[in-house]
Amino acid sequence: MFNLRATQKSDLAALDALLARSYPVLLKPDYPPSVLVTALPIISRAQPALLVSGTYYGVFDGDNLVGAGGWSRAAPNVQRTFPKTGHIRHVVTDHRRTRQGIGSALMDRVIAAVRADGITRLACQSTRTAVPFYQAIGFEPLGEVQVPLRPGITFPAVKMQMRL
């Protein structure tokens, strides 16, 4: 049984560790080394403001963080809001614990929260790796995008959406 709760500032080190150990393994089959070498140091770091937003959640097995993710009204890298639209943010499952219901439990919490907040559409910039997961819960792919990470560094992703 997992414990799913809103993250807090004290979860920062555990989230950084989860991202750093899992993203390289999970993303390796779908991205060339030339992309991963520049992107992983950036995407494998927790976003402190998101962590304490109240809309970002951790999934714990005992004291171990085994999954995390959430949503925001502001679009990533844009910091503007769109009426009735929520944005999926920085989702990860421990690479040793995939297909155990962690991601599904997390997304169930996110979808319940956005519905309660009046959101009618969810947008997502999915990794290529996570596209089948998001499709299985009702997201539709809209096409490939280049997510800006830093000046001169982008990350190939798939823009997806889900109507609620």
Image (spheres, rainbow, N blue to C red):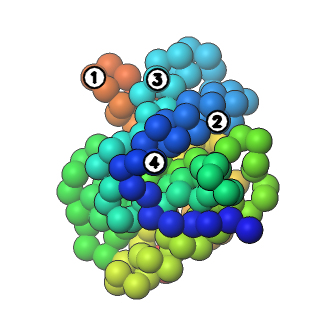
First in sequence: mark 1 vs mark 2: 2
Q: Which SS class for mark 3?
A: helix
How far is disc 3 from disc 2 in space, using C-alphas? Answer: 12 Å
Residue wearing tag 1: 151
CA gap between label 2 and label 4 equals: 16 Å
Who's the residue at 58% across and 39% down the image?
18
- Assign a secondary structure to mark 4: helix
| Cβ atoms at labels 2 and 4 below 8 Å apart | no
Q: Is residue 25 above or below residue 82?
A: above
Identify which amino acid the numbered label 1 is placed on. Pro
Identify the residue under disc 4. Answer: 11
> Mark 3 to mark 1: distance in Å?
14 Å
- Residues at badges 1 and 2 in contact (C-beta under 8 Å)? no
Q: Nearer the viewer, mark 3 or mark 1?
A: 3
Q: Considering the numbered disc 1 on the image, is that residue within a helix, a strand or a loop? A: loop
- Mark nearer the N terminus (4 vs 3): 4
Marked residue nearer the N-terminal end (4 or 1): 4
Residue 17 % position (x, y): 55, 34
Q: Residue at x 79, y 55 (%)?
A: 99
